[in-house]
Image (cartoon, grey):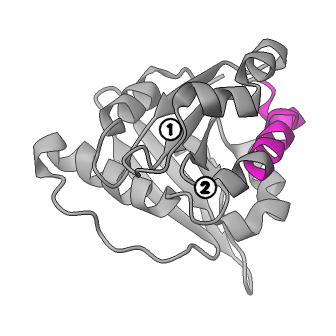
Amino acid sequence: MLACSASLCFCQKTEMSSNDICLLIGATGVGKTLLLKRLQKLSLHGLGELGEPPSTLPTVGTNLTDLKLKKKKVTLRELGGCMGPIWPSYFKDCSSVIFMVDSANIAQISSSCIQLLSVLSADPLHSASVLILFNKRDMPCTMSLIEIQSLFRMDDIIASATQPITTLELSARSGEGLQEVLSWLESIIVK
C-alpha cells in the first residue's frame, strides 16, 4: 500500500505483499542511486548487459525498486543521504539494510561510521541483516579494505552488533561486486 501526504511518501508492508523490504542508506554522494539502477538492470538482464553507467542526481526523498531474484522478490528503498535525521522512521518496515560508504572520500569516513553506529543501535533493526558496502573501489584514491575497516573499527562493530553483518567492496560504476550484492539479497532470511 502506498500512502502519500503533502511531502512524504511511504510504503507499508501489507498482508497482500510478500516482499522483503531492504533499506539502502548512506551519506549523500556515496552511489546509492547508481547502485539501485545497476542492480535493477542486473536482475533483469544479467551482467553482460550492464552497459555504460546511467546518469544520476542526488536523491531528495526516496526511491523504490523491486528486484526479482531467483527465489524471491525484494523491494529496495533508497533513502537520500540528506534524509539521515528521519531514517529511523523507515526502520520498522524493513528486514535488511544496505549501508553504503564512499571509500574514496576520506573526509566522509568518520561521519559514515557514526551514522552506521546509530543505525546498528536502533531497536527496530536489532535482528535485521546488514550489508556494509565500500563503494567506488575503481577510483584511484581509495583506501584499501584493511585501512577502511581499521578506521571503521569493523572488528569491534561486528563483535558488539546484534545483527548479522557482511562487508563487501564494490564499484557500482564498473559493476564489480554487483553480483555479490544480489547473492547477499537472495541469501538473507526475513526475521
Please report the residue visible at 79 percent of the width from the left and 52 percent of the height from the top.
111
Q: Quadrant of residue 72?
A: top left
Residue 115 x/y as whole percent: 80, 47
Amino acid type, residue under disc 2 in the picture? Asn
Q: Residues within 10 Å of mark 1 (few under 14, many from 20)?
A: few
With respect to residue 160, does 140 lie above or below?
A: below
Q: Quadrant of residue 165?
A: top right
Amino acid type, residue under disc 1 in the picture? Ser
Which residue does the numbered mark 1 point to in the structure image?
Answer: 18
Q: Is residue 127 magenta?
A: no
**Lower position in the chain sequence, tag 2 or tag 1:** 1
* Secondary element type, mark 2: loop
Please report the residue visible at 37 percent of the width from the left and 29 percent of the height from the top.
180
With respect to residue 145, does 58 lie above or below?
A: below
- Most frequent secondary structure within the magenta stretch: helix
Please name whichever residue, 165 or 112, is drawn nearer the observer in this view of the structure. Answer: 112
Check the picture and name the quadrant holding the C terminus. top right
Please name whichever residue, 80 or 170, is drawn nearer the observer in this view of the structure. Answer: 170
Residue 97 x/y as whole percent: 63, 39
- Asked whether the residues under the numbered discs 2 and 1 touch, taking CB atoms below 8 Å apart as contact, a structural biologist would say no
* Segment tinted magenta in the rendering: 111-126
Q: Is residue 116 magenta?
A: yes
Residue 66 x/y as whole percent: 41, 52
Q: CA distance from mark 2 to mark 1?
A: 37 Å
Residue 141 x/y as whole percent: 48, 50
* Secondary element type, mark 1: loop
